[in-house]
């Protein structure tokens, strides 16, 4: 991706997002998802004013975080989280959006360095896909939220979901997430983030209450296929 293309995509996207936010009457932030893209691409995007970046693979992310340490960026972990990666994630990221079980809650809190602010976390909800291994069931959200709220080094901020497009054509999954989010807000303090919507469906997500969208391909172009690591 050349810099002029990225500049054009970024401007187009930020305009589209603020238009949707205006119609939905609430502010919306955008996370730039940079998995598979090199540090130089992140740097070019940061130069356009973007601060928050999302990464899915821990090793890949750590090398970019190191390389871009001179910039004041906010890193979100948005990939499936294994127990043996919790320490690195707790030490190097500001946010984790993919909390789905108690085991990783305890590990993230244990490994969050004392000199850093609490790690911001979102519970990932498996809203529509019984076959997916990622995300907790809607029924399990409350108990997981209580578990997070009891951890000294974590700060529960809200919910995240990756609905299957085929199950969400009319926004059914987004609507269900908005309802869960409202319930969570009534029961816990500090809940201010509903992360849903990607390149292909962010306008619908914002319409249903998303205030953090995660955008990759609409910004940087199609990703080359990457082997799982
Ligand atoms: C890759 C990814 C995105 C971005 O997807 P695009 O369709 O490229 O915008 C958003 N969220 C998560 C969790 C992802 O893994």
Image (cartoon, helix red, strand yellow):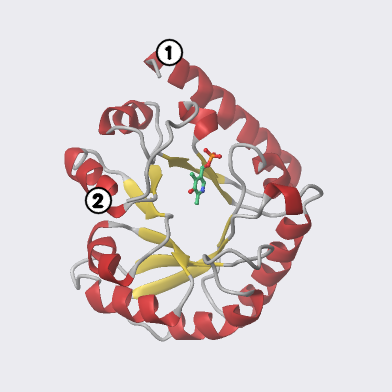
100 or 32, which lies in front? 100
Along the horizontal axis of the image, is 187 left or right of 54?
right
In the picture, measured across the screen, residue 165 lies left or right of residue 142, that is: right
Residue occupying the point 82% across, 49% down: 170
Give the structural element (helix, strand or loop) at label 1.
Answer: helix
**Which of 22/52 is in front?**
52
Q: Residue at coordinates 67% horizontally, 41% vertically from top-left?
A: 201
Q: Quadrant of residue 1?
A: top left
Give the percent coordinates (x, y) of residue 92.
Answer: 24, 57
Q: Position of residue 227 (x, y in %)?
A: 37, 43
Q: Which picture quadrant has residue 162? A: bottom right
Is 159 above or below relative to 104? above
Res 70 visible:
no
Disc 1 under 8 Å from ligand 1? The reply is: no
Disc 2 versus disc 1: nearer the observer: 2
Q: Image point 41% across, 35% down: which residue?
A: 50
First along the sequence among labels 2 and 1: 1
Residue lying at 41% horizontally and 86% vertically, measured from the top left: 150
196 above or below 156? above
**Dot 2 alpha-carbon crowd within 10 angstroms: few under 14, some 14 to 19, many 20 or more:** some
Q: Nearer the viewer, residue 116 or 203?
A: 203
The residue tagged with tag 2: helix, strand or loop? helix
The label shown at residue 206 is none
Horizontal and vertical percent position of residue 189? 54, 77
Does residue 228 appear to the left or right of 65 in the view shown?
Answer: right
| The quadrant where residue 195 appears | bottom right
Taking depth in this image into account, of 45 and 40 the one nearest to the observer is 40
Q: What x and y, as percent, mark residue 109?
A: 31, 77
Q: Which residue is mark 2?
A: 59
- Quickly name the residue at label 1: 4
């Amino acid at each position: 991706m050349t810099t002029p293309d990225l500049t054009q995509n970024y401007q187009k996207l930020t305009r589209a997002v603020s238009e949707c936010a205006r119609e939905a009457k609430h502010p919306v932030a955008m996370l730039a998802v940079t998995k598979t893209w090199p540090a130089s691409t992140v740097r070019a995007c940061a130069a356009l004013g973007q601060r928050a970046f999302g990464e899915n693979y821990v090793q890949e992310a750590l090398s970019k975080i190191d390389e871009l340490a001179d910039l004041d960026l906010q890193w979100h972990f948005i990939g499936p989280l294994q127990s043996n990666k919790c320490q690195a994630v707790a030490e190097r990221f500001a946010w984790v959006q993919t909390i789905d079980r108690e085991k990783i809650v305890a590990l993230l809190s244990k490994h969050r360095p004392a000199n850093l602010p609490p790690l911001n976390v979102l519970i990932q909800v498996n809203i529509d896909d019984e076959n997916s291994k990622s995300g907790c069931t809607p029924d399990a959200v409350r108990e997981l939220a209580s578990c997070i709220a009891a951890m000294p080094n974590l700060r529960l901020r809200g919910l995240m979901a990756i609905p299957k497009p085929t199950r969400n054509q009319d926004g059914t999954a987004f609507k269900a997430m908005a309802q869960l989010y409202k319930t969570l807000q009534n029961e816990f303090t500090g809940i201010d983030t509903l992360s849903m919507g990607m390149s292909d469906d962010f306008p619908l997500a914002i319409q249903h209450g998303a205030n953090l969208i995660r955008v990759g391909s609409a910004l940087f172009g199609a990703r080359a296929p990457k082997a799982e690591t």
